[in-house]
C-alpha cells in the first residue's frame, strides 16, 4: 500500500514540475516557444505590391515612343548575272548575261516630321527603287538623298509631312549594362521590338570596306535578325541611341550579339548629307596603335590607357597642333578614348575646320593641344555637292557614274570605285571605255567612290591614266589627254 502511494506522489511531483517548467519557459522566451509549437515557417500572401517601381522593368513607354517612327524599307535591285561565256567566239567572244530582279528588305528611322529617314547604306545599296511602309500601313516611294559606305549610313526622303519621328539621344552617355530596345522588321515581321543590354562600346568588327571606314559599334544582346538593319536602337526613355547594322553569327541569324552605329556619329553624317549632299570627313593626321602590356613595357608607359601615336602625317592637323610621335592621346575634347575606334568616332563627329582639344601624355606629362581638323586633301575646305549634281563637274567626259554595289565589290574583289552607267560622246568613250566599266585607279591613285573620281578629274590637265575592271572581271586601262 505504501509502495502504491509513493508511486502516486512521484507522478504528481513530476506533473507539477513539468507544468512549472513549461510556465517558466513560456515567460522567458514566448516567441521561440510559439515557433516551435507551430511547426512551420511564416508565410506571406502572393499578391503583387503596386508600390514596386514598375519603370525598373517596363519598356512599354520606350516601345510606344519609337515603334511608330520605324519604317519597313523594301528595295528592288536589278543585277546582270552571267548566263554563259562564249569562248569559241560564236557571238564575238562576249560573255552573255541575263537580268535578274532582286528584292530586299530592311528598316529605317524617321528623324524629321517632313520625311527624312535614316537607314543603312547596305540596305539601299544599288537599289533602283525604294519603298517605305509606316507602322500605320501607309506606303511611300522614297528617294535616296545620299549614302556613305564608310559609315554604312544612308539618308532617304519621302514627300509627306507631319510624320511621327524619334528624338535623338546621346550615345556617349550609354553605359555598359544599360537596357536598350531594338526596333525593326526582322524576317519581314513588321514593328518588332526586342530588349537587351549594352554589352560593349567602340567595337570594331571589320565589316566595312575602304581605307576611310569608321567602325565604333555599340554591341548589345538585343535580338537582331536580317531585316533589322537600319532600324532603331533606343534607350528606356525612347530616345534614339543607335542604328542597328550587323550581327555576329555563324548562321546568318541572331546568335547572341548585335551591333549598332552610335547616334552621335549618325547625327553628324545626316546633317552633312542634308546640308551638303555628301559627308564632310575630318582627319587628325595620325597613325595610331592600341596600347597593350607589350607596348607599355616597350615604351615605358606607366598605364595601359589611351591611344599611342605611332606616326604623324607631315603637314597634317596633329603636326600643326604640336602633337608628336610617341604621345599618348587620352581625350578628344572631354571624352576619354582608350582605343582607335573610340578616337576615330570622336574625330568623325567633326567637320574639316572644326577645332578640337586633344589631351595627351607627352614625355610622361599631361599636355593640352588645340588642333584644327583637316580633310583628306590637307585643307579645311568643305565639299558642296547636291547629290543630283555630283556628275555635273565631270559631264565634259560624257559619263554618268554610280557607286559600286557591295555584291559587285565582293564578286570582283575590289574595295570600291566608280561605275560608268551611261556614256555619250566625250573623253572617256573616245578613249575606248565602255559602259559598265568600274574605275578603281586614276593616275595610279586608288578611288573608292564617285566623289573620289570627281575630285581626281576636276581641274586635271595633261595626260590621264584610268584603270579598272568590267563586271565580267576583265581588267583594263585607258590613257587620254585633257
Image (cartoon, grey):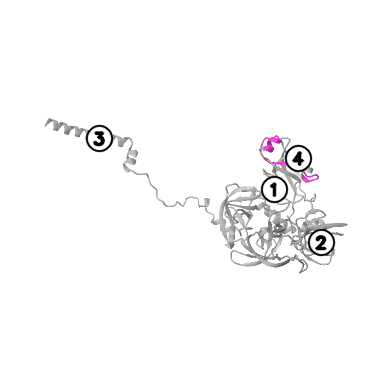
Q: Which residues are magenta?
A: 294-317
- Residue occupied by mark 2: 394
- Residue occupied by mark 4: 325
Please report whichever mark, 3 or 2, sits nearer to the chain's N-terminal start. Answer: 3
14 or 25: nearer the eye?
14
Q: Is residue 355 above or below residue 69?
A: above
- Residue occupied by mark 3: 18
* Residue 391 screen position, x and y as percent: 79, 62
Please report whichever mark, 4 or 1, sits nearer to the chain's N-terminal start. Answer: 4
Task: Kindly report the distance in space between the C-alpha atoms of the residues bearing marks 4 and 3.
Answer: 92 Å
User: Residue most toward the left?
Assistant: 1
- Residue occupied by mark 1: 346
Q: Which mark is residue 231?
A: none
Please report whichever mark, 1 or 2, sits nearer to the chain's N-terminal start. Answer: 1
Task: Kindly report the distance in space between the C-alpha atoms of the residues bearing marks 1 and 2.
Answer: 34 Å
Tags 3 and 1 touching, CB below 8 Å: no
Disc 4 or disc 3, which is closer to the eye?
Answer: 4
Task: Kindly report the distance in space between the C-alpha atoms of the residues bearing marks 4 and 2.
Answer: 40 Å
Badge 2 element: helix
Amino acid at each position: 500500500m505504501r509502495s502504491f502511494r509513493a508511486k502516486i506522489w512521484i507522478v504528481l511531483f513530476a506533473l507539477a514540475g513539468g507544468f512549472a517548467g513549461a510556465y517558466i519557459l513560456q515567460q522567458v522566451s514566448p516567441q521561440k516557444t510559439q515557433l516551435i509549437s507551430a511547426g512551420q515557417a511564416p508565410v506571406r500572401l502572393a499578391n503583387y505590391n503596386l508600390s514596386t517601381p514598375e519603370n525598373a522593368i517596363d519598356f512599354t513607354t520606350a516601345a510606344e515612343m519609337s515603334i511608330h517612327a520605324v519604317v519597313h524599307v523594301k528595295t528592288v535591285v536589278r543585277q546582270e548575272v552571267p548566263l554563259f561565256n562564249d569562248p569559241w567566239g560564236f557571238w564575238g567572244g562576249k560573255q552573255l548575261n541575263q537580268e535578274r530582279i532582286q528584292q530586299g528588305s530592311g528598316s529605317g528611322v524617321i528623324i524629321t516630321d517632313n520625311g527624312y529617314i535614316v537607314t543603312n547604306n547596305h540596305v539601299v545599296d544599288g537599289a533602283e527603287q525604294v519603298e517605305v511602309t509606316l507602322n500605320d500601313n501607309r506606303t511611300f516611294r522614297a528617294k535616296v538623298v545620299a549614302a556613305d559606305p564608310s559609315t554604312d549610313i544612308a539618308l532617304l526622303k519621302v514627300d509627306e509631312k507631319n510624320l511621327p519621328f524619334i528624338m535623338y539621344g546621346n550615345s556617349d552617355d550609354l553605359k555598359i549594362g544599360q537596357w536598350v530596345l531594338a526596333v525593326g522588321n526582322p524576317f519581314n515581321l513588321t514593328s518588332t521590338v526586342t530588349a537587351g543590354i549594352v554589352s560593349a562600346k567602340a567595337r570594331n568588327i571589320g565589316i566595312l570596306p575602304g581605307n576611310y571606314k569608321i567602325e565604333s559599334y555599340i554591341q548589345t544582346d538585343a535580338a537582331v535578325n536580317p531585316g533589322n538593319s537600319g532600324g532603331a536602337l533606343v534607350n528606356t526613355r525612347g530616345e534614339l541611341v543607335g542604328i542597328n547594322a550587323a550581327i555576329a553569327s555563324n548562321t546568318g541569324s541572331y546568335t547572341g550579339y548585335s551591333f549598332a552605329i552610335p547616334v552621335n556619329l549618325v547625327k553628324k553624317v545626316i546633317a552633312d548629307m542634308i546640308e551638303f549632299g555628301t559627308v564632310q570627313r575630318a582627319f587628325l593626321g595620325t597613325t595610331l596603335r592600341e596600347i597593350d602590356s607589350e607596348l607599355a613595357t616597350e615604351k615605358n608607359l606607366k598605364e595601359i590607357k589611351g591611344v599611342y601615336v605611332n606616326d604623324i602625317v607631315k603637314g597634317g592637323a596633329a603636326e600643326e597642333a604640336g602633337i608628336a610621335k610617341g604621345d599618348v592621346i587620352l581625350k578628344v575634347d572631354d571624352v576619354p578614348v582608350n582605343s582607335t575606334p573610340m578616337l576615330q568616332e570622336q574625330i568623325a563627329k567633326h567637320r574639316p575646320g572644326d577645332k578640337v582639344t586633344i589631351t595627351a601624355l607627352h614625355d610622361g606629362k599631361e599636355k593640352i593641344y588645340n588642333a584644327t581638323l583637316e580633310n583628306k586633301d590637307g585643307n579645311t575646305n568643305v565639299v558642296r555637292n547636291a547629290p543630283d549634281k555630283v556628275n555635273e563637274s565631270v559631264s565634259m567626259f560624257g559619263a554618268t557614274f554610280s557607286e559600286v554595289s557591295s555584291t559587285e565589290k565582293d564578286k570582283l574583289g575590289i574595295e570600291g570605285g566608280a561605275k560608268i552607267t551611261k556614256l555619250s560622246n566625250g573623253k572617256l568613250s573616245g578613249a575606248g571605255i565602255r559602259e559598265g566599266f568600274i574605275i578603281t585607279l586614276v593616275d595610279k591613285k586608288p578611288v573608292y567612290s564617285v566623289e573620289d573620281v570627281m575630285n581626281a578629274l576636276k581641274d586635271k590637265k595633261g595626260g590621264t591614266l584610268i584603270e579598272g575592271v568590267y563586271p565580267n572581271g576583265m581588267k583594263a586601262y585607258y590613257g587620254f589627254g585633257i
